[in-house]
Image (cartoon, helix red, strand yellow):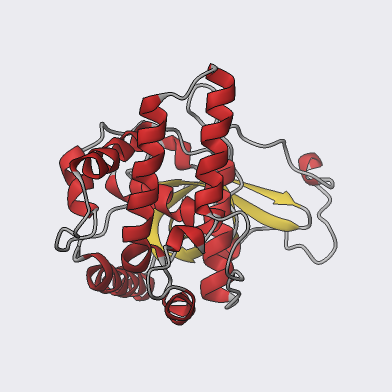
């Protein structure tokens, strides 16, 4: 994902637009030094916008000067308005035949990469959790395939199915932004998180269970079951669908023998798991 998202959801599920132009943009006369009087893109223009590693059709709805540079408020065509956001010019491309070809090329490469990791070749655009009901069968198909390991009980399978309930959760704008930044740090800047993480996924889930136990005054069986399912799903999904190409060697070096990925990786990759469920399955 390129750049950070600049929008936030309101209680009604829409996007709260930011304040008006800064630094004299509102008076219609003065522009900050070295800032062009007109932006690269205009209101109502159809463009291609980067969202993660791929390009999607979008429409520029507003343009403003913010902090000495043009910003564009875009709506992704066919998406929920909750994904509308302010972006910089670097996130946009003119809608030309050449750029459409680039869009198809990126989508094809993304599909090939997904196919090699999860056995699925179809690409799904990110969508809000309010857009549609969860297709539980599709979620089960998303889960990594393989032979049932010895010791994998019916309770464990039940716990993993319980994790599907997570798909009904809202995905806050701050976490969307974190996914964007995470993608950029790894794929564009080559910055990998240092392993092992502290707290790791096991620690995070344990602390959440302690929080809920203290809040409810007792251990809620359904919560414990869901958290166990998350851990199982994370361990299975990490090497197949949660790592970028530049992270695979690091994974081979860090996870070996009977080491559980959830004891090595932390919040960054746990967030990717939630993103994979909410942004691709829905």
Compared with 56, 93 (above or below) is below
> Image check: 10 left or right of 158?
right
Number of numbered discs visible in the structure rendering: 0
> Image check: 32 left or right of 250?
right
Is 270 or 5 nearer to us in this picture? 270
Residue 137: which quarter of the image?
A: top left
Query: At 38% across and 26% down in the image, what residue appears?
Result: 221
Is 190 or 105 nearer to us in this picture? 190
Query: At 28% across and 43% down in the image, what residue appears?
Result: 160
Compared with 192, 77 (above or below) is above
Name of the residue lying farthest toward the front: 151
Picture coordinates of residue 237, whole percent (x, y): 33, 59
Is 169 or 207 nearer to us in this picture? 207
Is 144 or 167 nearer to us in this picture? 144
Q: Is residue 135 visible?
A: yes
Picture coordinates of residue 225, whole percent (x, y): 35, 34
Residue 111: which quarter of the image?
A: bottom left
Picture coordinates of residue 145, whole percent (x, y): 18, 61
For the C terminus, give its image quadrant.
top left
Query: At 35% across and 32% down in the image, what residue appears?
Result: 168
Q: Is residue 2 visible?
A: no
């Amino acid at each position: 994902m390129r750049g950070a998202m600049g929008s936030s959801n309101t209680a009604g599920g829409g996007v709260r637009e930011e304040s008006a132009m800064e630094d004299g943009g509102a008076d219609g006369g003065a522009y900050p030094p070295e800032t062009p009087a007109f932006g690269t893109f205009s209101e109502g223009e159809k463009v291609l916008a980067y969202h993660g590693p791929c390009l999607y059709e979008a429409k520029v709805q507003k343009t403003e000067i913010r902090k000495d540079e043009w910003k564009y408020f875009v709506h992704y065509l066919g998406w929920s308005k909750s994904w509308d956001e302010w972006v910089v010019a670097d996130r946009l491309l003119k809608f030309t035949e050449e750029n459409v070809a680039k869009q198809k090329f990126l989508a094809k490469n993304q599909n090939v990469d997904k196919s090699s990791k999860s056995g699925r070749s179809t690409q799904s655009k990110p969508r809000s959790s309010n857009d549609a009901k969860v297709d539980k069968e599709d979620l089960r198909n998303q889960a990594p395939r393989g032979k049932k390991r010895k010791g994998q009980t019916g309770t464990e399978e039940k716990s993993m199915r319980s994790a599907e309930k997570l798909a009904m959760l809202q995905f806050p704008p701050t976490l969307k932004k974190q996914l964007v930044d995470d993608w950029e740090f790894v794929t564009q800047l080559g910055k990998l998180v240092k392993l092992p993480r502290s707290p790791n996924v096991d620690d995070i889930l344990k602390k959440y269970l302690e929080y809920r136990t203290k809040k409810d005054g007792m251990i809620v069986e359904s919560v414990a079951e869901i958290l166990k399912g998350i851990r199982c799903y994370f361990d299975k999904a990490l090497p197949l669908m949660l790592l970028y190409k530049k992270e695979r060697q690091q994974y081979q070096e860090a996870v070996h023998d009977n080491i559980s990925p959830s004891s090595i990786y932390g919040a960054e990759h746990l967030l990717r798991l939630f993103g994979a469920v909410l942004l691709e399955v829905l």
